[in-house]
């Protein structure tokens, strides 16, 4: 199946003990329990009666269709700097815009350590701009590049970073390789061999597939955070592989008069990818290393060190078993930012389309113009229903991402990401970005020829949503990551007692026929059914791509719905109509089987 992931394959081949436990000893009892729960839920569904809704938006829906969220004081400077910048298509000019923002200290690098929620929180406020290229540079510069140094670097390395801000020096994140592609971090071929005599690391791209690719801002960056497998000298003939590590090094020098950049040595080769269909102001680079030497001090050494004597040591924070766990955690913050930006951008387009449709009067026959008031697009039932359903569903998804963002900020401070937070971030990524693309596509179809006008923002600038689906790990990989972790987590992961009990209690406390509880029941029934089917198939389930995708999305719906009722709904206070948002979510998001390209 095209969606089979190495995560699941390795789980099947290398962890047979866990798989045997899941599909033998616990199978009978667990299936019986699940069948009872499904049966009870089906009875509840039989007595369910949908609330009839009008095609007029409620008070809460009007609020999300007409109002823009206030910008937090701490995020105002950086949000205004990004939103006020002119949209440019020239890569060099766009890079200069980023340099000015960095040098202007609209967001201090040091705040990434003291107040990580500033960076995570401001992303959704730049969605009002068409400058997706500059927005992407912002996430690369502050989250991937600077954020990695702040999170994994020593105090000295952080100070090196802080010293570059006044000059507006740019950085990139040399992470993805041609061979690994969307499996960023899972496959690393770039090597860094330590030379103890000279106290340098020799970074090399040994194969054509080890070349770094799609490195945003790479063509105009003086610095890079480079991912490579660290090899240390050993008593054997071959150096010992210590796994992937990050290095903070200068790769290019910039001429202050011309603004042109050149590699620091012939050991670094930076070339540009072909012309893209959108985001023209953003450069994306290939980077190849040919025995590129960096200092011992360039290894990000907060948790792994190579001493002057050549000894390697590892001091991981609680909850991390491998250095790779820490490195991948750097992608978690990026996935939250991308998800929130995509959803916020989609909501902005829905809001702007609604404003136009509310003013657009429809044709009236000349014979009746004197007695008939022209109606608007939003007064037509199907058009109104489209705006209602998608705006309310986006509000639910946005709420889930916001609550996950707050949890991620706490994890950054603790330098530890528990499994449930990792799962939540993966869900944010594939639900937020996939549905964002879907919402934009629906707006194009709804607005007709208006979508062809540049003012609609439904043209090339909206393809930033498509880009976020593949960035920081393709959405399909995120789905299979969720399923793989469920399999490895065993019974406790597959059947979280608190989550399932809250869902059942919610369904029982509300009226059995209330549409507000229907979403919870539908999600639970589908999830339990898919788990039972997976158990019945055993290891053969690994070959069922559609089953794995449906299982990932059903799990996501459980989490999103639970989050909405335990926290998201409260933000609307006494506004009428918010309790019916779940009806829209069920209509447009809860689709089974899940479309191959949702």
Image (tube, rainbow, N blue to C red):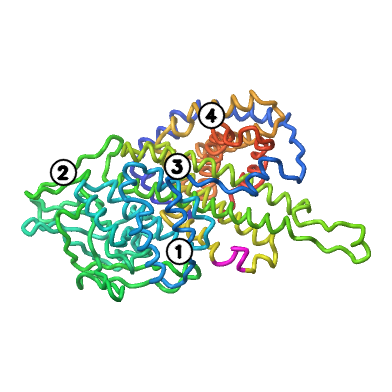
Look at the image and say whether residue 106 sits in the magenta stretch.
Answer: no
Assign a secondary structure to mark 2: strand
Say whether disc 4 or disc 3 marks the residue closer to the N-terminus: 3
Q: Secondary structure at mark 1?
A: helix
**Which picture quadrant has residue 239?**
bottom left
Q: Tell me the residue at 37%/50% (across/down).
A: 331
> Which of 9/571 is in front?
571
- Residues drawn in magenta: 454-460
Which one is nearer the viewer's eye here, 502 or 383? 383
Q: Is residue 456 left or right of residue 289?
A: right
Specify the label residue 291 is tagged with.
none
State how far apart marks 2 and 1 are (Cα). Answer: 40 Å
Q: Residue at x 31, y 73 (%)?
A: 259
Separation of residues labelled 4 and 2 (CA atoms): 43 Å
Residue 456 inside the magenta-drawn segment: yes
The residue singled out by tag 2 in the image is 313
The image quarter in which residue 501 lies: top right
Q: Nearer the viewer, mark 4 or mark 1?
A: 1
Residue 500's disc number:
4
Q: Which residue is mark 3?
A: 405
Left or right relative to 543: residue 585: right
The residue identified by callout 1 is: 133
Is 50 located above or below residue 257 in the figure? Answer: above
- Per the model, the C-alpha gap separating discs 3 and 2 is 32 Å
Q: Are marks 4 and 1 in contact (CB under 8 Å)?
A: no
| Labels 3 and 1 touching (C-beta < 8 A) | no
Q: Do residues under tags 3 and 2 come within 8 Å of each other at their CB atoms?
A: no
């Amino acid at each position: 199946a095209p969606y089979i992931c190495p995560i699941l394959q390795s789980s099947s081949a290398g962890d047979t003990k866990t798989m045997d436990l899941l599909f033998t000893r616990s199978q009978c009892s667990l299936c019986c329990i699940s069948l009872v729960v499904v049966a009870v839920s089906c009875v509840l569904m039989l007595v369910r009666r949908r609330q009839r809704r009008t095609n007029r938006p409620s008070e809460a829906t009007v609020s999300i269709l007409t109002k823009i969220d206030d910008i937090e004081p701490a995020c105002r400077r950086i949000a205004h700097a990004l939103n006020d910048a002119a949209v440019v298509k020239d890569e060099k000019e766009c890079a200069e815009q980023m340099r000015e923002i960095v040098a202007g200290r609209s967001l201090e690098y040091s705040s990434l350590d003291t107040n990580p929620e500033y960076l995570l929180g401001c992303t959704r406020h730049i969605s009002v701009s068409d400058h997706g290229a500059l927005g992407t540079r912002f996430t690369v510069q502050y989250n991937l590049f600077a954020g990695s140094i702040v999170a994994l670097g020593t105090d000295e390395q952080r100070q090196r970073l802080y010293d570059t801000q006044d000059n507006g020096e740019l950085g990139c994140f040399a992470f993805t390789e041609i061979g690994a592609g969307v499996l960023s971090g899972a496959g690393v071929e770039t090597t860094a061999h330590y030379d103890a005599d000279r106290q340098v690391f020799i970074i090399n791209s040994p194969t054509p597939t080890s070349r770094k690719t799609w490195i945003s801002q790479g063509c105009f960056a003086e610095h890079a955070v480079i991912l490579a497998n660290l090899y240390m000298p050993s008593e054997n003939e071959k150096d010992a592989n210590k796994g992937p590590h990050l290095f903070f090094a200068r790769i290019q020098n910039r001429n202050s008069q011309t603004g042109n950049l050149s590699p620091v040595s012939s050991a670094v080769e930076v070339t540009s990818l072909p012309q893209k269909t959108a985001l023209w102001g953003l450069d994306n680079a290939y980077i190849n290393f040919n025995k590129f030497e960096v200092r011992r001090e360039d290894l990000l050494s907060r948790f792994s060190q190579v001493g002057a004597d050549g000894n390697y040591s590892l001091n991981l924070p609680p909850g991390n078993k491998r250095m790779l766990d820490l490195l991948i955690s750097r992608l978690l913050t990026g996935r939250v930012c991308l998800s929130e930006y995509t959803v916020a951008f989609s909501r902005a387009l829905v809001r702007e389309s609604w404003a136009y449709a509310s003013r657009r009067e429809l044709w009236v026959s000349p014979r009746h113009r004197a007695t008939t008031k022209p109606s608007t697009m939003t007064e037509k039932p199907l058009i109104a229903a489209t705006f209602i359903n998608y705006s309310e569903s986006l509000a639910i998804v946005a709420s889930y991402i916001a609550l996950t963002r707050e949890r991620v900020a706490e994890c950054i401070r603790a330098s530890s990401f528990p499994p449930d937070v990792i799962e939540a971030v993966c869900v944010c990524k594939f639900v937020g970005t996939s549905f964002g693309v879907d919402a934009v596509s629906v707006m194009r179809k709804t607005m007709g020829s208006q979508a062809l006008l540049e003012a609609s923002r439904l043209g090339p600038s909206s393809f930033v949503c498509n880009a976020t689906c593949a960035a920081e790990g393709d959405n399909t990989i995120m789905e299979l990551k969720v399923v793989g972790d469920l399999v490895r987590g065993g019974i406790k992961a597959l059947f979280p007692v608190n989550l399932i009990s809250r869902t059942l209690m919610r369904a029982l406390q509300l009226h059995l026929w209330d549409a507000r509880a229907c979403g919870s029941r539908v999600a639970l029934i589908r999830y339990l059914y898919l788990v039972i089917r997976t158990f019945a198939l055993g290891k053969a389930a690994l070959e069922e791509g559609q089953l794995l995708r449906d299982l990932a999305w059903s799990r996501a719906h459980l989490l999103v719905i639970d989050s909405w009722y335990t926290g998201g709904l409260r933000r609307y206070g006494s506004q009428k109509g918010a309790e019916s948002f779940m009806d829209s979510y069920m209509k447009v998001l809860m689709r089974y089987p899940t479309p191959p390209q949702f």
